[in-house]
Image (tube, grey):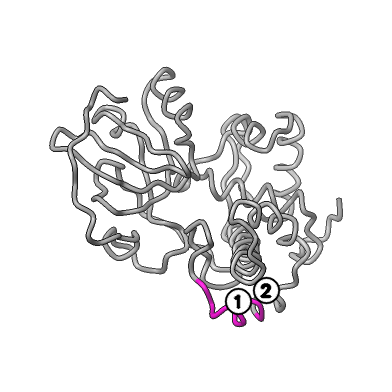
């Protein structure tokens, strides 16, 4: 791997590490090396070695036995890569008729070889979109790094979207929630909420019913790329016109 500390010299592997850390990072808490390795399908040894190299390049803070957090420089790189991916998704889907999921898979290969200038010209050609074909937010500009406030999932209203950043509780509750696809980095939308605290949410292509106890285990944050506002109502995308419905808490 090239050891020059410049964005241009970064390999695809480096960019993927930074992007995955950005999606997993819970505020300023370190991302465990074991979790990062699992998400990237590499060995913990390999992940540990890469994170030490990233620290040398000023991209992450590495804490032995705890994990890694992104520096502002590292987060800016991650946002830059994700912006390119989602701009390509829009182009492939809207201009070439590629199915959204396939467009994302193809865009994942383009994001690492697209110059910044080309990405911005493509964005302008597309009318500077803010959402991907799968309704995921596009970072507003190359190199933007944002820190987000944190809220409980139970605090979201019907129609609101946010991103999972932390799952609390004991090992059983944690494993169950992750088994439902609610891992850090996943975008969720509240479809319905009952007076007893239970919720019906959308995560990816799945709909999940959560009891009040399970909903309290999950912390979310405003979508990372929705803007610079720091209040929940300002930064979480709301879908007006959706009425709450009752959920059977036993469904979870």
**Residue beneath label 1, please?**
123
Query: Farthest right residue?
Result: 2
Residue at the spot 58% in from the left edge and 58% down from the top edge: 75
Quadrant for residue 81, please give it: bottom right
- The residues colored magenta run 121-129
**Label 2 element class:** helix
Q: Nearer the viewer, residue 154 or 7?
A: 154
The residue at the far left in this view is 195
127 is within the stretch colored magenta = yes
Name the disc covering residue 17, or none.
none
Q: Is residue 7 left or right of residue 225?
A: right
Give the image location of residue 225, x and y in percent: 47, 63
Q: Quadrant of residue 66?
A: top right
Task: Please determine whether, in this image, residue 107 is positioned above or below residue 31.
Answer: below
Asked if the residue at tag 1 contacts the one at tag 2, i.e. Cβ–Cβ closer than 8 Å, the answer is yes
Side of 1 relative to 172 (left or right): right
Q: For marks 2 and 1, give the CA distance.
A: 6 Å
Label ID, residue 119: 2
């Amino acid at each position: 791997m090239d050891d020059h500390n410049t964005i241009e010299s970064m390999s695809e592997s480096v960019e993927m590490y930074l992007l995955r850390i950005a999606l997993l990072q819970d505020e300023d808490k370190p991302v465990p090396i074991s979790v990062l390795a699992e998400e990237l399908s590499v060995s913990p040894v390999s992940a540990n070695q890469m994170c030490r190299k990233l620290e040398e390049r000023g991209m992450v803070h590495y804490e032995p036995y705890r994990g890694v957090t992104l520096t502002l420089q590292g987060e800016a790189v991650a946002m830059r890569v994700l912006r390119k991916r989602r701009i390509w998704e829009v182009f492939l889907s809207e201009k070439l008729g590629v199915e959204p999921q396939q467009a994302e898979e193809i865009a994942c290969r383009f994001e690492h070889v697209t110059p910044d200038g080309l990405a911005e010209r493509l964005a302008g050609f597309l009318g500077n979109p803010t959402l991907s074909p799968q309704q995921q937010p596009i970072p507003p500009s190359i190199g933007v790094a944002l820190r987000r406030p944190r809220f409980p999932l139970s605090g979201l209203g019907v129609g609101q979207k946010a991103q999972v950043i932390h799952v609390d509780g004991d090992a059983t509750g944690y494993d169950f929630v992750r088994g439902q696809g609610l891992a850090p980095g996943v975008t969720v939308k509240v479809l319905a909420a009952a007076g007893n605290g239970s919720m019906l949410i959308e995560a990816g292509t799945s709909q999940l019913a959560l009891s009040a106890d399970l909903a309290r285990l999950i912390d979310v944050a405003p979508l990372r790329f929705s803007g610079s506002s720091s209040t929940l109502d300002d930064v979480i995308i709301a879908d007006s016109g959706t009425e709450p419905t009752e959920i059977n808490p036993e469904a979870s």
